[in-house]
């Protein structure tokens, strides 16, 4: 990559902040959009290039996204961190915050290890625009599958699920947040680890981390909003750790000459992520993954055809 311009940094930063939280794959968009634009964008913003500064830039943006999640969910994290220390102090895992803290820790381990071991393989082999477009379409099918599972659960449990979702939709936000966290904390640890492990699929560009985590959460019996909140809480340490690991790259030769662009992109990513998580936390009170599934199918298939036929 010869350079990274401010327009490229700001636009891709905003896109990353949105697509990291919307279930439509931030890495997939980071790979596909520059290829579709072509020209200097395709040259400058190539995530699969050896020693790519663009990859370091993208992962650096994750720190801004994680900070936005920490700001939005600060009350939850105060409870979770308090639960972690109380579980250590009293050597127990009993209360809701204690269970939620350990759910997040255990669920983060598989994707953390997979990211360290497989990131290079996934980036170089599958980090090309055409495979990313295919996986984006597959992501749409995964989201449709999650909705099918949810409808099946509603038919099976009927009025109980419908009443719970209606109460959640009409509850006060602070109260519903606490209730949602309490319900998530009652989940079995094995299910939490399974939800966390599903995020490994998102190492392939085009598969959404929040999307697969939401589908796994819904399969475990969580509502749309509960699954979304748990996916955001799970994503925070993973995204933050990935960003922190790449910050030394930005401080070295890969970051030479793009410090201002990184800061501008990070600011755009922070603002976009904060607005996105606020929107989605309200959206999933009453709505579903279907619009995102349709978008992924159309965008994935359309991008693949454009990239292969032009």
Image: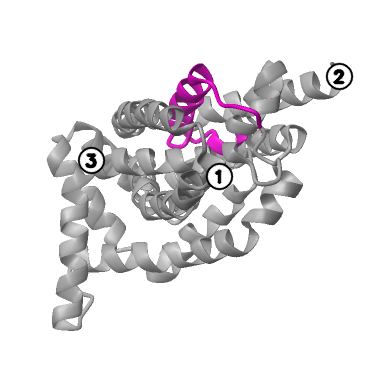
User: CA separation, marks 3 and 2?
Assistant: 44 Å
Where residue 167 sits: x, y (%)? 21, 38
Q: Earlier in the sequence, mark 3 or mark 2?
A: 3
Q: Which mark is residue 71?
A: 3
Residue 164 appears in the rendering: yes
Foreground tag (1 vs 3)? 1
User: CA separation, marks 2 and 1?
Assistant: 37 Å
Residue 297 appears in the rendering: no
Q: Nearer the viewer, residue 247 or 196?
A: 247
Q: Going 55% across and 44% down the picture, which residue do you hit?
A: 253
Horizontal side, residue 113 vs residue 101: left or right = right
Q: Which residue is mark 1?
A: 253
Q: Give the residues drawn in magenta, as a range.
A: 1-28
Q: Nearer the viewer, residue 258 or 280?
A: 258
Instruction: For mark 1, give the secondary structure.
Output: helix
Q: Which mark is residue 309?
A: 2
Q: Going 13% across and 40% down the picture, which residue do you hit?
A: 174
Q: Going 28% across and 30% down the picture, which residue do you hit?
A: 278
Instruction: For mark 2, give the secondary structure.
Output: helix
Marks 1,3: beta carbons within 8 A: no
Q: Earlier in the sequence, mark 1 or mark 3?
A: 3
Quarter residue 228 falls in: top left
Where residue 162 sits: x, y (%)? 33, 40
Foreground tag (2 vs 1)? 1
Q: Is 178 part of what is drawn in magenta?
A: no
Q: Earlier in the sequence, mark 2 or mark 1?
A: 1
């Amino acid at each position: 990559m010869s350079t990274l311009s401010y327009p490229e940094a700001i636009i891709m930063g905003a896109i990353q902040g949105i697509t990291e939280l919307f279930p439509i794959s931030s890495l997939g968009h980071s790979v596909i959009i520059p290829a579709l634009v072509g020209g200097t964008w395709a040259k400058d913003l190539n995530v699969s290039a050896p020693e790519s500064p663009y990859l370091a830039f993208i992962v650096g943006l994750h720190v801004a996204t994680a900070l936005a999640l920490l700001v939005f969910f600060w009350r939850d994290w105060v409870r979770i961190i308090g639960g972690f220390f109380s579980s250590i102090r009293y050597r127990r895992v009993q209360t809701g915050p204690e269970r939620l803290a350990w759910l997040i820790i255990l669920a983060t381990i598989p994707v953390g290890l997979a990211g360290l071991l497989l990131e290079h393989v996934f980036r170089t082999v599958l980090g090309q625009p055409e495979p990313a477009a295919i996986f984006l379409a597959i992501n749409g099918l995964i989201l449709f599958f999650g909705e099918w599972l949810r409808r099946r659960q509603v038919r099976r449990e009927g009025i109980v699920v419908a009443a719970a979702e209606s109460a959640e939709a009409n509850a006060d936000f602070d109260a519903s947040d606490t209730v949602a966290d309490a319900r998530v904390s009652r989940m079995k640890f094995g299910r939490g680890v399974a939800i966390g492990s599903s995020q490994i699929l998102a190492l392939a560009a085009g598969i959404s981390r929040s999307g697969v985590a939401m589908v796994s959460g819904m399969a475990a019996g969580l509502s749309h909003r509960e699954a979304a909140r748990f996916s955001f809480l799970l994503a925070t340490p993973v995204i933050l750790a990935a960003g922190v690991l790449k910050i030394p790259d930005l401080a070295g030769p890969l970051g030479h000459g793009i410090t201002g662009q990184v800061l501008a992109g990070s600011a755009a990513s922070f603002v976009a992520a904060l607005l996105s998580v606020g929107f989605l936390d309200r959206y999933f009170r009453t709505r579903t993954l279907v619009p995102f599934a349709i978008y992924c199918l159309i965008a994935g298939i359309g991008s693949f055809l454009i990239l292969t036929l032009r």
